[in-house]
Image (cartoon, rainbow, N blue to C red):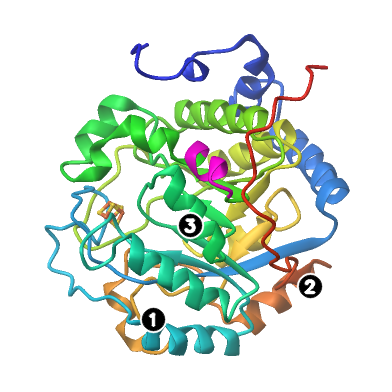
Amino acid sequence: MNATLPEWLNPSPDETRFREMLSPESSWTLERLAAESRAITLRRFGRTMTLYAPLYLSNHCPSGCAYCGFASDRTTPRSRLEQDELHTELAAMKNLGISDVLLLTGERTRNADFDYLRRSVETAASHMQRVSIEAFPMSTEEYRELARAGCTGITIYQETYDREQYARLHRWGPKKDYAERLDTPSRALEGGIKTAGLGVLLGLADPQQDALMLYRHIRHLGRTWWRAGLSISFPRIRPQTGGYQPPFSVSDHQLARMIFAFRIALPDVELVLSTRESPAFRDGMAGLGITRMSIASRTTVGGYTEPENNKNGQFHIHDDRSTEKFCKALKAKQIEPVFKNWEHAYNGPSSPEPAPPAT
Ligand code: SF4
């Protein structure tokens, strides 16, 4: 293992059960995993599903990620929302019933820099109950400022933990820095951000190995920042501008096994499934392990006020059901859609906490 990378990336003796659950050859059948995962989900989260929606602030990006429709060599038209446009976009989202928003940008550029992001968080916090970001890696001090502006969560995917594949896929730009990205959730939590969401882009590398590394990462964060809220997302690669073909395919069975394994191994971690997935798969996973889903998503800048422009999104969505239709499907499974379970009250930045004693 490269000396500059942290110790927690190394195998650990207490991950045997998680490895077994990931393996289709183990005694953990899919049915056994589903039953256990369902029971834990019910016990820890009840019959609820927290709902959020993404909002793209800008699609300017200097990076060259091979799998992304916003990479700097794509011909996608570029734009960013000005603050008055952001107010309009947020109002359109509120009309859809959304009060939990995830703001997205590409990597840091002059068009979408830290100051722009901080102002956008302030604007979003004036409309929404919960504001999270999926943006470029920042310093601890910048995260502290964002927390003061009303940001409560970050999402940052490592994309893949396979370093050789990471180097190949991130052809140029700031996202090439594997180690900096790996450390980003820690800096955010140190800066007072309350929740961190991790994930890998399934299909970029061996999915079982990526799931194992993701497990190590989230456990490391849970031990260091044990008061933080942690979540894991399960994005599978979707068609996008550029036509990237992933080297690994991840079947519904494989993905379901992964979700159940994470639920059983990490009972308190929020598990997230986006509109990248089909209505049938999302309906199937609701209640079996997933506790947070996006709805009514648009993946273009200004997509809520100009939905006809959605063909130039970062990727194509699969579940395009309306809020009403999706909530009806949840209710048919006796699952209560939750649009708001968070009243934002900023209490100052959190400090690193000592790990609780091992049991
Ligand atoms: S994945 Fe993010 S950083 Fe990479 S090209 Fe797309 S927007 Fe830019």
Write down the residue under mark 3.
145
98 w.r.t. 265: above or below? below
What kind of secondary structure does the magenta stretch mostly adopt? helix
Q: Residue at x 38, y 82 (%)?
A: 83
Q: Residue at x 27, y 67 (%)?
A: 59
Relative horizontal placement of residue 221, taking residue 330 as reference (left or right): left
Does residue 159 show up magenta in the picture? Answer: no
Q: Secondary structure at mark 2?
A: helix
Write down the residue under mark 2.
332
Crowdedness near tag 3: few (<14), some (14–19) or many (≥20) residues, C-alpha within 10 Å = some
Mark 3 vs 1: CB contact within 8 A: no
Spot occupied by residue 323 in the image (x, y as percentages of width and height):
62, 80
Front residue of 164 and 90: 90
Relative horizontal placement of residue 146, taking residue 271 as reference (left or right): left
Front residue of 279 and 188: 188
Distance (Cα) linking label 3 and label 2? 42 Å
Front residue of 9 and 184: 184
Task: Give the image quarter of residue 50.
Answer: bottom right
Q: Residue at x 57, y 51 (%)?
A: 193
State whether residue 278 appears in this view.
no
Q: Mark 3 or mark 2: which comes first in sequence?
A: 3
Write down the residue under mark 1.
303
Q: Secondary structure at mark 3?
A: helix
